[in-house]
Every structure is written in C-alpha cells, then in structure tokens.
C-alpha cells in the first residue's frame, strides 16, 4: 500500500510540496507491497516466492491554526491490492482518528476536520489497515504512521519574570552590568525564525543600553548621581523572526534605583549661629541643637560633632544624636551672667564612614561658629558653702552661739537675705537662727549621751522675692564634757571559797563611762581611805581599766559569816576627774579543791538565781497553800473513817480523844489515871459484851491479888497477852491504850504538872556553846530568862 501526501505549508513551500508529491516515495523509502504471484517462464521450473506485504510509508504534515471552510487535506492511503473496484476498505485508528482525522474508506484520502495548535500537541500517532470489504479480512497488516503539526509564527516572545526591580550604585562606570533579561517564545525553535528573539530598548536611553542577543542591560553614562536622579524606568522589547518585519514582539519594564555612596560631604547651612542660654540652666541639661546637612543617606550620612575651638570649651560639651544626626549642646559648668555674658564655640561636623574612591571630592567635614549669649536671671541666694559643720559643748547654756551661715544674692541687685530653719511638726526645736545674721543658737540644754549629732536645714530667701529659696545642710556635733562618773560594767556575783588563801584573786571587775573616750578611760580603782582597812579583802588596780579582788586572810566560814561587803571607789580620766563609789557583795561558799563551788548559803543561792523578793513570796505562798490542802485532805479522810466498835456498849477501854493538851496528871476530868498510880485500884477484868466467851479466865480474886503484886509494866504486858490469847476478839485489830509512862528517868520529869506554882532556876546559858544548831533555842531561852528577871 502506498501513502502519499499533498500538504503545502505556505506559498514559499509550494515547490517543496511538489517535490514531495513527485518524489515522496523515493525520499521516504516507500515500499510497494504486492500480492503473492507465481511467474512461469519458458524453459524454467516454477519458483514460489514468499509474498511481500507492506505500506508505502510517508510522514504526513498538517499546518496548525488552519482556518479554511473545508477540511484540510492531509494525505492518501493506497494498497497494492486495491484495483479501484471498491473491494478494499481503508480503516484509520489511533490519536484523533474519527474526531480530528477522517478517512475515505474507499479512496483512502485523509482530512483534518479541526484547527490544530502545535504548542499544545506536536504530532499524532495513527494506525492504518486495508481489509476486504466483502469478507472483512485484512488484506494488509496494520501499520503505524505519524502526522506532525507544522509550526507557524503564532506566539509572541514573553518575559516570564517581569517586571524587574534592580539597583546599581551611583557614580558607577559606564558599561556596568545592571541586569540580564530573558524572553521565551513558544514557537518551534527548530523550524524557521519563529522563535529567534532579539532585544531592544524602548525607554531608558541615554542612561542605559541592552545587548540585542543576550538581553544584558548596562549603564550608558558616566557618574550617574543619585542626588540628581534616583529612580529610572527602562522598557525592554523582545521580537521574534530575528527582528524582521512581521515578527511578533513582547516587552517588560525594568525599574532601576541608584543606591547611595558617600560622595557628598556634610555642610552647615550657615557659617555663624547664635544661641541664648539663661544663667539658671542646670548643669548637664541640653541647652541647644545644631545640625549639618548631608545629601547622602543611611550610614553614608552619619556624622559626629565636636568642639574644636572657643572660650566655652570647658563650659559646654556636644554630643551626637544618631537618630536625628543633630549635635546636642549641653552645659558642663554653671553659668553666671555677672561674671561672663557670652561664649564662642567652633563646632565641626564630620562623616564617620568614608569612601576613599571619592576622597577627591572632600574633605568630608565642615565647621561653623556658635556664639552663646548668657541671659540674666533673678537667682536665689547663694550660700558661701555647700554644707556647714558646727560644734557645741553639751550642757551649754541656752542661747549659746553654735555658728553662722552666710548667703548672698548673686544678682547685681544684691537683695537682702533672710534665714530660717526648716522644722517638721514633730521635731523638737533645739536651735534657732537669727533671720538677719544667720547666727544659730541653742534653745535647750544638749546632752551628748542622748543625742550626739543634729542635722538641720537652713533656708535663705530674698526679701524682694521670697519665692526664690536656697537650702543648705548644717551638721551640729555635740562635744563631750565630763559629766558622767564611771560605773561598774555590770552587777558582779563574787564568790570566795572557804579554803581560800591570802593574796588569792577571787574576781576581776571593770568599769564603764557614758562620756566620750577622752573623758572616760583610763579608770582608777581604789578603796576609800576614809574607811578602816578591810581585814578580809583588798583591791588591786590592774592599770588596764580593770581591777582584781584579793583575799587578805586564810579560810572563811559560812557558819561564822556567809556574806561580806567591800566598798570601792572608781575615778575616770576626765578633766576634772569624776569618781563614784560602789559596794561589792562577796558570798562565802564551800568549794572543791580545784575551786569548783560545791554549795553556798540558801540565801546566796536564791540571790544568785536572780529571784526577786516578790518571786520568793509567791513561792512561799504556793508552799503554804499546798500544805493547807494536804492537812485538809487528811482531816477529811479521818472524819469519814468508819468506827471499829460495833455498838456503843462494846467499849473495851475508856479511850477519850481530845484536841487540847490539858493539864497533865492533874487533869482528871477526862480520864482517871488513878490506875496508873495504883494498879490495885484498876477495875476487875471484864469480858467482851459483844460475844459470849467460850473459856473461863482466871478467877477475879486471883486477878486482884496479882495486880497488887506486879508493877504497872507487868500489868500492861499481861493485858497484851490476854488480848492476844483471847479467842473471842473480832477479826480486826483493836487499840487498847494504858498510857504507861515507865520508870522515872535520871534527868527528872519534864512535865509541867508540878511546875505550875514554882519558878524554875534552870540556867540555859550553856545552850550558846552547843554550836549554831542550838543558836535559835539559846536565843529563845535567853529571852524567857530576861523576862523572868524583869
């Protein structure tokens, strides 16, 4: 089968179409396929050949963007088996078959029914087949072929990245590269000049140029100044068909900004300035501003200001505000209109970041002259000193002069000044001041030991303008005088051991003085010479503001004397010297051999414990209350005890209980003691009435004779034995009292029965020799004896 194409691209290619039509088969290596045949040649045997089947192959072309009313002819399919009788049917399958491409199944002509766009799809792959129309059997095997869409110049160049924003330093050399732009064309770059682009500049000359082939934009002028013009808008065009007439074009905008370089020095707008500053301006405050202009921007415009000359260099200073690039003028020292009325300063402003490429345009600094006029202001009084320190002795009389402050009006008017002291409402007023002279005097007697220092504030004001005030601090130190005698540093608890030796140091004391060190130490310790010499203790001055207490004799006894008193004198080193007397209390205690205290008098212990008299009384009251509670408790217990006797008739003995002492043997009302004096007068033995005895005891007459013959002691023993052997006693203990006094002692009776009407001539003085244990008894009997004598 043979495939032929009759497509023509344009009039220019008519000859190409003609050549294709005429020589298409040879150009595309067409293969002609024929049916299987057997050729008989005379004299030769019949030779069978394998049939050759195939397509006459051509690559079809179709123009894009066809706008004609009729379908566009693409080409023709033809099989060698086609005899032109319509028995062969051509079938087309593949991309676009039946929709874009249609085929005449009888003639094999292929047409395109739609307008194609090469930029969307460049070619289509199709399959062709010839079959027998009657049997529908393939006459040829299916073959594949391609229909290419042939390009036309229907796409203009485009700048996909535009518009562009770019910067270039000012003052750059001519030809400095700025930016390279690139345009793309969607047409086929391999076919014709449809995609061949050239660049040109439409706007931006004569400042910039563009390379036609590469699209590189460059500066076209020398020393382009940013301060003259900063922004440029450059329009670049790209045209295909190599820029020929009829080519399509596209354009873009390039915004170019010149960046700053330090090519402009700072400049002061004026060469002379004048500034007014009042003399009341505070030190450290800003009094004015000055600024130099710089056409550059950013860091290229940074500058510093300095004072390079002038008579006000020591009075004023200048600093740079980095935000506003201004010079801030500040006051270093106070101004005084009366002393100097004007100052002159030479101020310089210089760039901090220099570009040496442009040093030929310098110098990059400028200077100006500033004249400062000092303004006269009505100022408050000025004290002669920033603060005052005064001294006054304590105990000085009221009205004593402490010191004087002085303030003057610094203005030329020299107004009079008045003084007064600032007091708070709650402050005690120890001083006053003369309103006209400024003399400070005391109003109260001062005590250094109470307040050694005073701080007061003195205010001065002008009489003509009382609102103008000045303040000054006055410190007043109170000087010491020797008005306090020395005292013992504390209360000392001094103990001496009974076994102390002569000359032994038992304690060390020290003193203190409320006065200043000049009138206090050194202290002198001594005994009062007006008193007799103490035989027990002495005092030694250690000459280091301490003194030692020493013993004069050996051994001390608590029983003889447990407390000693030592009067001492202390004097200070002041002029005149003051002295005081104190009495030391020394307690005697029993000590171990190594000096440790073993025990002291009870009173000493209480004193050493630090208990007051009230505390001792409270303790004694508590003890008495406890004793009363105990006695009351015992009494209640006894009153509630049940009696041991079963009935009132069951009385074994005549036991009478009473609470008074009575009169001894002569008191016979409560108890008959005749039986004690004469055992024979005792009653006969009685049996218990509560039970019936089971045994008989000794007959009565026998008992009476026995009582006559035995002593009372034997009588009591007999009674005890009878009680122990009595089987009728109840199962509880019983009390039987017989009040037997026993035999007469050698010392005689101490009963008062026989001494009621006689005076005793006993001498009790010997009790004083029995020791301290009988001291109280000896005192009592001594008092009785003295009363009797009286």
Image: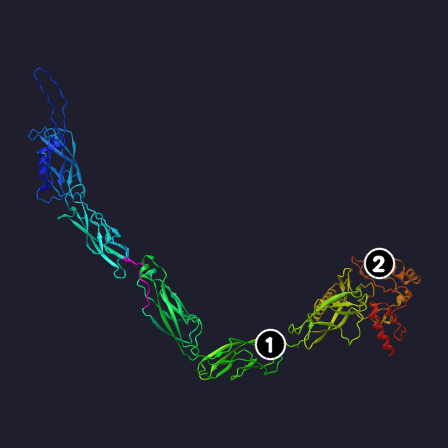
Labels 2 and 1: the sequence-earlier one = 1
The stretch drawn in magenta includes residue 263: yes
The stretch drawn in magenta includes residue 411: no
The residue that mark 1 highlights is 478
Asked if one can make out residue 47 in the rendered structure from this viewpoint, the answer is yes
The residue that mark 2 highlights is 723
Residue at left 9%, top 38%?
15
Separation of marks 2 and 1 at Cα, in angstroms: 100 Å
Q: Is residue 288 above or below residue 123?
A: below
| Residue 438 x %, y % | 53, 82
In front here: 240 or 298? 298
Left or right: where does residue 617 sit relative to residue 318? right
Which label number is shown at residue 497? none
Q: Is residue 139 above or below residue 509?
A: above
* Quadrant for the N terminus in the image: top left
| Residue 382 x %, y % | 48, 78
The stretch of residues the image draws in magenta is: 258-268
| Residue 104 x %, y % | 9, 36
Total marks in image = 2
Left or right: where does residue 579 sit relative to residue 36? right
In front here: 216 or 424? 216
Could you tell me what secondary structure mostly forms the magenta stretch? loop
Q: Find numbered disc 2 in the image and state the secondary structure of the residue it sits on.
A: helix
* Quadrant for the C terminus in the image: bottom right
| Residue 8 x %, y % | 10, 39
Of discs 2 and 1, which sits in the foreground?
A: 1
Single out the residue that lies furthest toward the front: 360
Q: Find numbered disc 1 in the image and state the secondary structure of the residue it sits on.
A: strand
Residue at left 93%, top 63%?
708
């Amino acid at each position: 089968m043979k495939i032929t194409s009759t497509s023509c691209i344009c009039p220019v290619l008519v000859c190409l179409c003609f050549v294709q039509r005429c020589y298409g088969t040879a150009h595309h290596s067409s293969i002609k396929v024929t049916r299987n045949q057997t050729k008989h040649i005379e004299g030769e045997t019949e030779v069978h050949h394998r049939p050759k089947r195939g397509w006459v192959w051509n690559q079809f072309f179709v123009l894009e963007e066809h706008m004609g009313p009729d379908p566009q002819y693409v080409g023709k399919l033809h099989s060698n088996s086609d005899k032109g009788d319509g028995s062969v049917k051509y079938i087309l399958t593949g991309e676009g078959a039946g929709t874009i491409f249609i085929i005449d199944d009888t003639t094999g002509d292929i047409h395109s029914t739609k307008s194609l766009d090469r930029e969307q799809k460049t070619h289509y792959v199709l399959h062709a087949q010839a079959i027998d129309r009657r049997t529908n059997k393939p006459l040829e095997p299916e073959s594949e072929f391609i229909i290419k869409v042939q390009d036309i110049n229907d796409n203009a160049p485009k700048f996909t990245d535009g518009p562009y924003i770019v910067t270039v330093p000012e003052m750059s050399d001519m030809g400095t590269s700025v930016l390279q732009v690139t345009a793309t064309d969607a047409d086929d770059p391999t076919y014709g000049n449809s995609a061949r682009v050239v660049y040109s500049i439409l706007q931006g000359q004569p400042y910039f140029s563009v390379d036609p082939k590469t699209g590189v934009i460059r500066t076209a002028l020398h020393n382009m100044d940013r301060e003259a013009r900063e922004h440029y808008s450059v329009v670049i065009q790209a045209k295909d068909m190599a820029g020929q007439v009829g080519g399509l074009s596209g354009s873009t905008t390039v915004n170019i900004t010149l960046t700053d370089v330090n090519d402009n020095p700072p400049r002061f707008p004026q060469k002379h300035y004048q500034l007014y500053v009042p003399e009341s301006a505070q030190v450290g405050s800003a009094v004015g501003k000055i600024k130099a202009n710089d056409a550059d921007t950013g860091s290229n415009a940074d500058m510093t200001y300095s004072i390079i000359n002038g008579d006000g260099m020591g009075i004023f200073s200048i600093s740079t505000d980095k935000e506003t690039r201004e010079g801030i003028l500040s006051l270093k020292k106070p101004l005084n209109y009366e002393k100097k009325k004007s100052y002159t300063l030479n101020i310089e402003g210089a760039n901090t970041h220099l570009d040496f490429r442009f040093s030929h345009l310098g110098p990059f600094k400028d200077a100006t002259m500033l004249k400062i006029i000092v303004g006269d202001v009505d100022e408050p009084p000025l004290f002669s000193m920033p603060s005052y320190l005064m001294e006054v002795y304590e105990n000085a009389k009221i009205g004593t002069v402490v010191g004087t402050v002085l303030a003057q009006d610094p203005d030329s008017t020299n107004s009079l000044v008045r003084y007064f002291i600032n007091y708070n409402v709650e402050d005690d007023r120890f001083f006053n001041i003369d309103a006209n002279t400024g003399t400070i005097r005391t109003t109260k007697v001062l005590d250094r030991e109470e307040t050694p220092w005073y701080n007061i504030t003195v205010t001065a004001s002008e009489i003509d303008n009382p609102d103008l005030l000045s303040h000054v601090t006055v410190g007043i130190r109170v000087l010491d005088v020797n008005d306090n005698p020395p005292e013992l540093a504390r209360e000392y608890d001094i103990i001496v051991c009974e076994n102390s030796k002569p000359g032994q140091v038992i304690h060390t004391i020290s003193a203190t003085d409320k006065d200043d060190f000049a009138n206090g130490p050194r202290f002198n310790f001594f005994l009062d010479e007006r008193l007799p010499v103490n035989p027990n203790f002495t005092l030694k001055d250690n000459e280091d503001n301490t003194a030692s207490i020493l013993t004069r004799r050996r051994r001390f006894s608590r029983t003889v004397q447990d407390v000693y008193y030592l009067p001492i004198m202390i004097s200070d080193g002041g002029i005149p010297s003051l002295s005081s007397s104190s009495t030391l209390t020394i307690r005697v205690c029993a000590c171990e051999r190594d000096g440790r205290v073993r025990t002291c008098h009870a009173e000493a212990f209480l004193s050493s414990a630090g208990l007051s008299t009230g505390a001792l009384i409270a303790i004694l009251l508590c003890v008495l209350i406890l004793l009363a509670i105990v006695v009351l408790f015992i009494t209640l217990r006894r009153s509630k005890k049940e009696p041991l006797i079963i009935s009132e008739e069951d009385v074994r003995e005549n036991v009478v209980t009473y609470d008074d002492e009575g009169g001894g043997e002569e008191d016979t009302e409560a108890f008959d003691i005749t039986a004690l004096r004469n055992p024979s007068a005792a009653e006969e033995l009685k049996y218990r009435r509560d039970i019936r005895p089971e045994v008989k005891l000794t007959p009565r007459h026998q008992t009476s004779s026995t009582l006559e013959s035995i002593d009372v002691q034997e009588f009591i023993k007999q009674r005890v034995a009878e009680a122990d052997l009595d089987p009728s006693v109840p199962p509880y203990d019983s009390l039987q009292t017989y009040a037997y006094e026993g035999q007469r002692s050698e010392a005689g009776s101490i009963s008062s029965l026989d001494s009621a009407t006689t005076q005793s001539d006993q001498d009790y003085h010997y009790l004083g020799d029995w020791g301290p244990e009988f001291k109280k008894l000896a005192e009592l009997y001594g008092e009785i004896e003295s009363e009797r004598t009286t």
